[in-house]
Amino acid sequence: QKEVEQDPGPLSVPEGAIVSLNCTYSNSAFQYFMWYRQYSRKGPELLMYTYSSGNKEDGRFTAQVDKSSKYISLFIRDSQPSDSATYLCAMSVTGGFKTIFGAGTRLFVKA
Amino acid sequence: NAGVTQTPKFRILKIGQSMTLQCTQDMNHNYMYWYRQDPGMGLKLIYYSVGAGITDKGEVPNGYNVSRSTTEDFPLRLELAAPSQTSVYFCASTSDTNNSPLHFGNGTRLTVT
């Protein structure tokens, strides 16, 4: 079993839709949970960062962590074509050091 | 502020050739990493370094070597390239172990034929 599981998609939605991206994990020691966005031919860039459980909101993006279920989610409201990218979940026991990545979900938002 | 810079952007190697992927960062980060990204497989850690002169193996180190003579530079060496090393390679850095995200370069696309 992989430490972090993420459906690679692709996921295609119409502009304005609410997008839900999810990951499950097996290591209960993970404390830091991140979402990276990766545009084509570019390196990943940090989108959201959460420590331990709970929700975090930043504009149209909301990250949720449920440690009891070992499940994290990223919601994108009012999705835009510019949101089309690969979204990688990532987690770590001690922050940036030895971050474990999911496979990434490729998202297409159609105008 | 350039961040993390990787060169070259693209490279085609023949089986058995060697090359060095260059990575430099200007953020004075102590921690640097090399990942490879294969389709549908996410990012796999090859090697990492916690400071100049200190390196250690990650999840998939076979066929690679690294060195860290300065804080800024962290080159990745491929000896005797094999088709299995066809991938996109990303270098990343971070300032410390906690509460600090990874900063990535834009990658090197390597094809071994």
Image (tube, coloured by chain):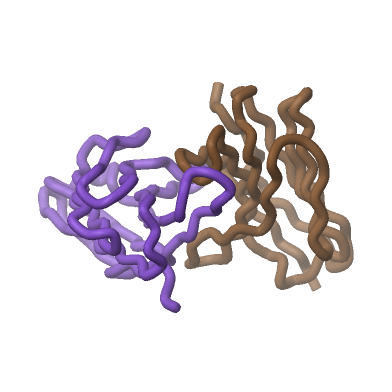
Report the side of A110 relative to A102 (left or right). Answer: right
Placement of the N terminus of chain B among the 4 image quadrants: bottom left
**Which chain appears brown?**
A
Q: Nearer the viewer, residue B7 or B15?
A: B7
Indicate the position of residue B43 as horizontal and vertical percent values: 47, 45
Can you say whether A71 is above or below A9 in the image? above
Q: Nearer the viewer, residue B64 or B48?
A: B48
Q: Residue at x 15, y 50 (%)?
A: B15
Report the side of A98 relative to B77 (left or right). Answer: right
Report the side of A36 relative to B54 (left or right). Answer: right
Q: Residue at x 41, y 56 (%)?
A: B92
Report the side of B88 relative to B53 (left or right). Answer: right
Q: Residue at x 12, y 46 (%)?
A: B80
Q: Residue at x 71, y 36 (%)?
A: A52
Can you say whether A7 is above or below A108 in the image? above
**Which chain appears purple?**
B
Indicate the position of residue B112 as horizontal and vertical percent values: 24, 53
Indicate the position of residue A90 as horizontal and vertical percent values: 59, 43
Q: How many marks?
A: 0
Image quadrant assignment for residue A84: bottom right
